[in-house]
């Protein structure tokens, strides 16, 4: 029986809170990490549904003394939800692997516009987490005296930490743990919507005629244009209601097969539940003629007005349960930021806009680095704003309409380009065209209304992020140029020997018992690996045996299905075969080992045990690419895998030598 390795204190704590590593060889692994439509509705649709706790309130309050026209705003919001969700359903069909606004703009418009869309969406997801948690804490503290308000900010930071830990365990686990909250919210709010309508049926039927009369009266007293500006501002202040609609298209990879069908079903559930909730709540506000009370949310006012004639104990219990479910769902709504944000970051990392470590999966098969980044950024925003929802609402919902607009523009362009191939292109073009007109209008209105109130800060933050990712991409492009130059140089150098070996058809070299064994850690068949092999032969003459080990890195780009994992394994085997042929062409014995995993260092450590067990006098080597003029950006964008490997093997008593490979623009 193999002795169990002792875990460090940090590893034991992580195991308790995050859980054991998942097994990639498990045949049911994708069943365990993907979501059916109902579960996806809870995990992804909760953001939109939870926004009904603050979006309608902000729109209602923005109307000032003209609450009689609330129904106009409510109907406009419902229509907007229907149009945007329909247009995003078409995006789901066209991009079944996900990517949402970032992929749509990148592929249908240009990579640069895709980058702008992605950066906008990331900032929006950070604000989604911030405003959802802050609003949830507001709902909880609506039940407490003013003296308790000083603890609100600490509570919001604690909730973000809890949500981070839940998501580090896995998507499915986090959603399952939050499902009871979602169900309680639906039941309590369905009752809170139906009850006022049942007991105010006549007023409900007359909402539109009454709103029309108030519009005419206000127009006569202050002018039609002024009234339209009030309505436009109220509509824009409620624009946070639409955020989260795009989350399904961004997170297709976590949906159960068939993904498109699951995605469409999820989108319909999301749009229907959000539309009904917003319409019902805003109608209820108007029916009770509610006014804002400092320290209380509008929903808290509604519930107290609704239960005023009830038994005191029953009424208070219902209010408390409903507000707690509301607060809890707002925390679930923050889940959309934790699901969608890291996914967008990982997609951008694969395209070299972000440091590539953000596309790496943890052993729980989640984008751990992205989750931590989102939690830190959201906490920073809350600290800066003091967790004030009124401040966060001003910053919120601007960026999502940048993404909406670019996505719709890309789809319109696509349908126009394929009109000769696509038989039913006109209805599709009309849907996305209408979506484009609507989202551009909302974007302009939101910018106009919110910019001077603090919206400029969102624009500044997004612009700063764009500047950062442009620098990252520029560095990676330069590095890729240097690496291609090295690859070409090394391929030319070994080409002759490999061709001669193929033509000679000689017997394979046998293991040399008198010689040392060099075990080289390689990635692709590239210049760094070839250079490392040649340097060992040149500088270490006693090495006639070469073992090549390689780890297929499972990241967000490859963890999309069993077929992708098989393609990754085939690619690793092919590259190792090329290295074996390289060693044979120089008259050396060669063998290879491989693994597929999320942590290269751990997998190499396990492979090294197999190598040492079979072969004697083994020294491990790895090529280390060195830039001519390294900078702090270089160190940040290129992980120190080689150093980590050296440390891990040293703990096992194995020696690893780093072979420097200098990258320059000249030979």
Image (tube, grey):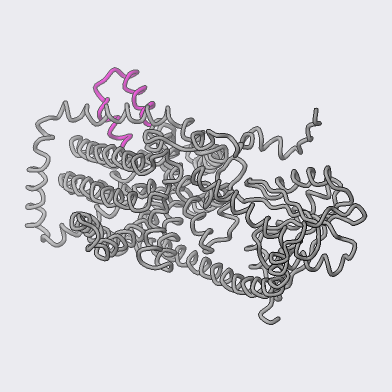
The answer to if 308 sits in the magenta stretch is yes
Stretch in magenta: 299-323
Q: Is residue 667 visible?
A: yes
When asked about the image quadrant of residue 503, the answer is bottom right
Q: Please, is residue 114 above or below residue 287 in the view?
A: below
Q: Please, is residue 249 above or below residue 30 in the view?
A: below
Judged from this view, the residue extending furthest toward the right is 514
Residue appearing at x 68%, y 69% in the figure: 499
Q: Is residue 136 visible?
A: no
Residue appearing at x 57%, y 41% in the figure: 168
Q: Please, is residue 562 above or below residue 633 in the view?
A: above
Quarter of the picture containing the N terminus is top right
Q: How many marks?
A: 0
When asked about the image quadrant of residue 188, the answer is top left
Judged from this view, the residue extending furthest toward the bottom is 666
- The picture places residue 562, in percent across and down from the top left corner, at 51, 42
Quarter of the picture containing the C terminus is bottom right
- Majority secondary structure of the magenta segment? helix
Given residues 296 and 195, the one toward you in this image is: 195
Given residues 382 and 254, the one toward you in this image is: 254
Residue appearing at x 36%, y 56% in the figure: 400
Indicate left or right for 452 with 522 as reference. left
The answer to if 640 sits in the magenta stretch is no
- The picture places residue 167, in percent across and down from the top left corner, at 53, 40
- The picture places residue 658, in percent across and down from the top left corner, at 79, 62
Indicate left or right for 293 with 582 as reference. left
- The picture places residue 328, in percent across and down from the top left corner, at 43, 34
């Amino acid at each position: 029986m193999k002795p169990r390795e002792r875990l460090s204190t940090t590893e034991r704590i992580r195991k308790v809170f995050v859980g054991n590593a998942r097994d990639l060889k498990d045949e049911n692994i994708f069943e365990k990490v993907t979501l059916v439509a109902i579960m996806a509705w809870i995990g992804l649709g909760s953001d939109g549904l939870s926004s009904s706790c603050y979006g309608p309130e902000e729109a209602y309050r923005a109307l000032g003394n003209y609450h009689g026209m609330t129904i106009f705003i409510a109907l406009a919001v419902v229509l907007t939800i229907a149009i945007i969700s329909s247009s995003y359903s078409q995006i789901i069909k066209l991009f079944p692997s996900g990517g949402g606004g970032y992929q749509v703009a990148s592929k249908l418009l240009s990579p640069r516009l895709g980058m702008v869309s992605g950066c906008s969406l990331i900032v929006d997801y950070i604000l989604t987490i911030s405003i959802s948690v802050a609003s949830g804490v507001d709902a909880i503290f609506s039940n407490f005296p003013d003296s308790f308000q000083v603890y609100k900010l600490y509570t919001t930071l604690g909730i973000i930490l809890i949500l981070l830990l839940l998501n580090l365990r896995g998507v499915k686990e986090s959603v399952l743990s939050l499902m009871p909250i979602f169900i309680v919210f639906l039941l309590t709010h369905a009752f809170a919507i139906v009850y006022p309508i049942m007991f105010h049926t006549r007023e409900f039927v007359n909402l539109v005629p009454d709103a029309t009369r108030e519009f005419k009266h206000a127009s006569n007293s202050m002018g039609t244009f002024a009234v339209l500006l009030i309505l436009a501002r109220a509509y824009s202040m409620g624009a946070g209601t639409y955020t989260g609609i795009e989350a399904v298209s961004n997170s297709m990879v976590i949906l159960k097969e068939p993904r498109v069908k699951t995605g469409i079903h999820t989108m319909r559930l999301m749009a229907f539940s959000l539309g009904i909730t917003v319409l019902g709540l805003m109608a209820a506000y108007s029916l009770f003629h509610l006014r804002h009370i400092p320290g209380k949310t509008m929903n808290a006012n509604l519930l107290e007005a609704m239960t005023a004639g009830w038994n005191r104990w029953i009424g208070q219990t219902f209010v408390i349960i409903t507000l707690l479910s509301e607060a809890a769902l707002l925390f679930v709504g923050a889940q959309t930021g934790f699901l969608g944000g890291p996914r967008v970051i990982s997609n951008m990392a694969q395209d070299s806009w972000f440091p590539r470590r953000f596309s790496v999966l943890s052993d729980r098969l989640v984008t751990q680095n992205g989750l931590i980044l989102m939690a830190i950024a959201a906490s920073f925003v809350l600290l800066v704003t003091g967790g004030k929802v009124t401040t966060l609402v001003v910053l919120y919902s601007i960026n999502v309409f940048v993404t909406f607009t670019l996505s719709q523009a890309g789809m319109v362009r696509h349908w126009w380009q394929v009109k000769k191939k696509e038989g039913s292109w006109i209805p599709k073009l009309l849907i996305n065209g209408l979506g484009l007109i609507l989202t551009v209008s909302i974007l302009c209105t939101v910018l106009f209304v919110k910019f001077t109130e603090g919206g400029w800060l969102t624009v500044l933050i997004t612009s700063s992020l764009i500047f950062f990712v442009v620098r990252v991409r520029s560095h990676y492009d330069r590095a890729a140029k240097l690496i291609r130059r090295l690859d070409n140089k090394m391929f030319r150098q070994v080409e002759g020997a490999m061709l001669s070996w193929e033509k000679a058809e000689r017997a394979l070299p046998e293991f040399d018992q008198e010689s040392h064994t060099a075990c080289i850690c390689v990635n692709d068949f590239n210049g760094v690996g070839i250079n490392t092999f040649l340097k060992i032969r040149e500088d270490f003459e006693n090495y006639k045996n070469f073992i090549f080990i390689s780890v297929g890195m499972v990241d967000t780009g490859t963890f999309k299905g069993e077929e992708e994992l098989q393609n990754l394994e085939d690619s690793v085997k092919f590259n190792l075969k090329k290295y074996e042929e390289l060693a044979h062409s120089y008259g050396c014995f060669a063998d290879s080992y491989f693994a597929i995993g999320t942590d290269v260092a751990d997998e190499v450590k396990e492979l090294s045990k197999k190598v040492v067990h079979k072969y004697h006098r083994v020294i491990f080597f790895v090529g280390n690419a060195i830039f001519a003029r390294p900078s702090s950006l270089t160190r940040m964008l290129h992980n120190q895998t080689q150093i980590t490997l050296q440390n891990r093997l040293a703990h096992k008593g194995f020696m690893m030598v780093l072979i420097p490979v200098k990258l320059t623009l000249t030979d």
